[in-house]
Image (spheres, rainbow, N blue to C red):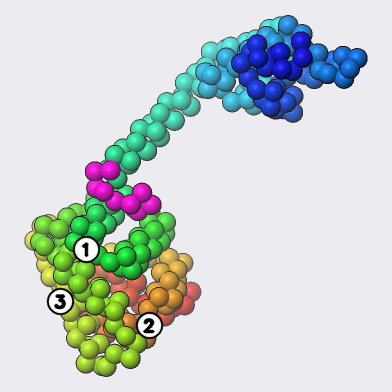
Amino acid sequence: MHSKELADFTGVTIRALRHYHALGILPEPARSDNGYRSYSVEDALTVLRIKRLSALGFSLTKIKEMLSSERGSLELNAEALEDLESSLTHEMERLERQRDMVRALLESEADPDVPMTYGAHFANLRKHGAGERLLKLEKAEALLLEEGLTFSPEQSEMAKAVFGVMSDSGAYDGYIALNEDFLALPAEAPAAQRIEMAERFRAWVVTLIAAAGSAGIWDDGAEDEPLEPALIRLVGAYNAEILNDAQIDVSKRLLALLAAENQGSAGMIDLLKSTLDPDAAS
């Protein structure tokens, strides 16, 4: 039979047959006088075996190993099936986790490219009317932090708990208003306006720390792991690209205020420092 006849009979495509030939799973058949491939019944049986094993989940590489040198025999040994079962179990677990993430995103109404740790945070930002520029900034930093940090389940839950405190305490409206004013701050803003903005940030941070402490999810005396230098540089470089001189000056003033009161985590301080000097962590 010719390629099309074999493909039609076995339910595969001619392209698949060519792929099998290229991988060496299906031997090249003899050609008829007119140059067409001429397949035998044995070739058809081989294609049906390949199709069957593929449907079970075996890779083409594994199928090639399983097909015997004598094309008529096939060893489906227990070891191969046990390996396949283990692989499928892991894949099912991965898909289950993936489905859980999709469900969580649907429930939180978060953007699909937002890291799971920040899903509820972004839902609250949108719910409380955050502008697109603020959302873009928050998303960029969330993606950088998620990639640069290895969140343990405990750390991830603590971050979510902090966002929960922000929501329960009604802090989102103030957070958004504060950041929108910050992003609207012109480069030529006078010193008095910069000082006032830094103080507003300080007051918000102190209030959040107090609320988180009361909720039992923030130990003001606990040591926090500093961020990796490469991550600090990336976040700092991004901030340097989007912030003007006045906004960077506000960050500098906020850093001084928090340091004077011994407020904020090591990670927060690192990020503020990176805003002032992206090359500081080298």
Q: Main secondary structure of the magenta part?
A: loop
Q: Earlier in the sequence, mark 1 or mark 3?
A: 1
Q: Are marks 1 and 3 in contact (CB under 8 Å)?
A: no
Residue 134 position, x and y percent, is: 30, 68
Is residue 228 depicted above or below 246 in this figure? Answer: above
Alpha carbon of mark 1 to alpha carbon of mark 3: how far? 22 Å
Q: Is residue 158 visible?
A: no
Q: How many marks?
A: 3
Q: Position of residue 220 (x, y in %)?
A: 17, 67
Left or right: where 71 falls relative to 105: right
Residue at the image position 11 percent from the left and 67 percent from the top: 210
The quadrant of the picture occupied by the N terminus is top right
Q: Is residue 265 magenta?
A: no
Q: CA distance from mark 3 to mark 2?
A: 22 Å
Q: Position of residue 30 (x, y in %)?
A: 85, 15
170 or 144: nearer the eye? 170
Q: Report which residue position mark 1 lands on.
A: 129
Residue type highlighted by circle 2: Asn
Distance of label 2 from label 1 (alpha carbons): 24 Å
The quadrant holding residue 269 is: bottom left
Q: Nearer the viewer, residue 128 or 8?
A: 8
Q: Nearer the viewer, mark 3 or mark 2?
A: 2
Q: Which residue is mark 2?
A: 244
Callout 1, which amino acid? Gly
Q: Is the residue marked by circle 2 packed among few (<14), some (14-19), or many (20+) residues within 10 Å?
A: some
Residue at position x 25%, y 73% in the image: 180
Image x and y of residue 251, in percent: 30, 80
The relative height of residue 198 versus residue 162 in the rendered view (above or below) is: below
Give SS at disc 2.
loop
* Span highlighted in magenta in the image: 106-115
